[in-house]
Amino acid sequence: WQLISPKDLSLPPVVFHWLPIIGSAVQYGNDPINFLLKCREKYGDVFTFILFGRRVTVALGAKGNNFVLGGKLSQVCAEEAYTHLTTPVFGKDVVYDVPNEVLMEQKKFVKFGLSTDNFRAYVGMIEDEVEHYMKTDVAFRTYQMDDINEWGSFHALKTLSEITILTASRTLQGKEIRNALDKSFAQLYMDLDGGFTPLNFLFPNLPLESYRKRDRAQKAMSDFYVNILRKRTSGENTEHEHDMMAALMGQKYKDGRPLTEREIAHILIALLMAGQHTSSATSSWALLHIAANPEIGEALYQEQVQHFGTPDGKLRSMTYEELKQLPLLDSVIRETLRIHPPIHSIFRKVISDYPVPPTLSAPSKDNDHPYVVPKGYFVLSSPAVSQVDPLMWKAPFEWDPYRWTNPEDVAAQQVFKAYSEDGGGEKIDYGYGAVSKGTESPYQPFGAGRHRCIGEQFAFLQLGVIISTIIRKVELRIEKVPPQNYHVRPAAGSSSLLLTWISRP
Ligand code: HEM
């Protein structure tokens, strides 16, 4: 089909809209999944919508995921889609501010720091942080007073955002960042995060205070990391064997050049931002669902008792290897990521006319030419849509962790098997060219292909220990899980995210 001449190709249908430049921005922004599902009913798996002047061609389903995420470097490009959002936040010379082959090398350096050895050390650190938080934060007052009869409450997203940054900095980011979090670093993080929003994605530069704050915070944070780095190189600070900075300091590019101080600083900022909203949103949703399904909360608790109960009725700490052997906990995280993948849309910029394979969108009687997505358009894949596709999943909108271990749920079992065999695309060869399979899966909370997430194992570790530590200590309740609100950020005090809890006897 690629031999067809361009004049025989046609454009995908454009979603109807009243406002020329704004296009479908409001509908997409308010509820992207519903918007995309409705468009699919009308236009099929491939269609274009207008997003503030940009033309975005959506490709849905497993084949659509493959079209976007399995595209060749000569066809689609992530740098051009994201750099205006990420470079002012992460800083220069890393991730999307460099050519793809440099990013591939940088991902390999980070992988080196995400070692099993480090993960083993992190389990206890994360458990420690969560326990300390519960012993000191005001939301857990009655727990601190050992009052087993009184219910307390906490705001899921606020609490889990705090716990996520505390645990990520204690482990990956290193001691100095963890200690500074109680002081100046927290404000720098908030200012930088204020510049990492959908508004910044749509409008790279506006004369707004939040943009100025973002730029000041980026510079200050970059200096902060460089200072830590210098203290380490001068030997003034030596306690840091398991963190990411230590791992990056020893790495060299293929041409023998070591990373510069700024590259190390900016990679650490990128990792901080990449893991923060994704993990805190996931742990919040997981706890909300556990609270709404107390029998699953109890089953999770019993899983802990079965594996870690001691003769005196207490629960001992777990090892990294043991954490990976808890099927219900694993299924709870997997299922939460299915219904609530934190990254619902993945974008690429089209850099040369990109024909749509007929297997994805066959010509119809109204349109007998195959589609082509022209250079200059964006393409969008949505794991969030394929992960709730009624054609693929049983009861797709139901949060049911047991689907992942139920042999009768053929669809989930197939996905699970393919995911485990392919490592969910983890087996990426970072040599130029070869990338993982897995781009055609309907289940891709961590993306697929050359830009696939490298933080999955860390995320499962962090989420697993946080959830275990909390459910060991308290029972959670909520009447029902609130609907997804795409505008909520941690600062928002939406009371619908309030979880109530009571200490376990
Ligand atoms: C890429 C999801 C946690 C680092 C991605 C992508 C997704 C994703 C969907 C692909 C983006 C694209 O193709 O455009 C998630 C989820 C997480 C999570 C759901 C947690 C639940 C983390 C953590 C880290 C991290 C903890 C760091 C330790 C990265 C990096 C990339 C990436 C470096 C590669 C970007 C690229 O190659 O273009 N993540 N992530 N992520 N993520 Fe994650």
Image (spheres, grey):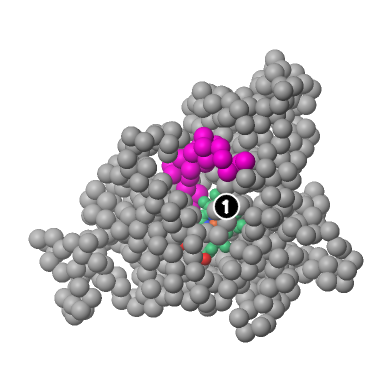
Would residue 364 be found to the left or right of residue 21 on screen?
A: left
Magenta region's main secondary structure? helix
Residue density around tag 1, few if under 14, some if 14–19, many if 20 or more, within 10 Å: some
The residue wearing badge 1 is 457
**Helix, strand or loop at mark 1:** helix
Q: Nearer the viewer, residue 489 or 459?
A: 459
Q: Nearer the viewer, residue 484 or 460?
A: 460
Bounds of the magenta span? 322-344
The reply to whether the magenta stretch includes residue 441 is no
| Ligand 1 image-quadrant field | bottom right
User: Could you tell me residue 184's position as x and y percent?
Assistant: 79, 55
User: Could you tell me residue 494's position as x and y percent?
Assistant: 57, 36
The answer to whether residue 399 is seen in the rendering is: no
The answer to whether residue 8 is seen in the rendering is: yes
Pick out the residue farthest to the left: 365
- 238 relative to 285, above or below: below
Would residue 459 be found to the left or right of residue 473 on screen?
A: left
Would residue 324 be found to the left or right of residue 75 on screen?
A: right
Q: What residue appears at the point 83 percent right and 67 percent down from the top-left corner?
A: 232
The reply to whether the magenta stretch includes residue 334 is yes
Q: What residue appears at the point 83 percent right and 71 percent down from the top-left corner?
A: 233
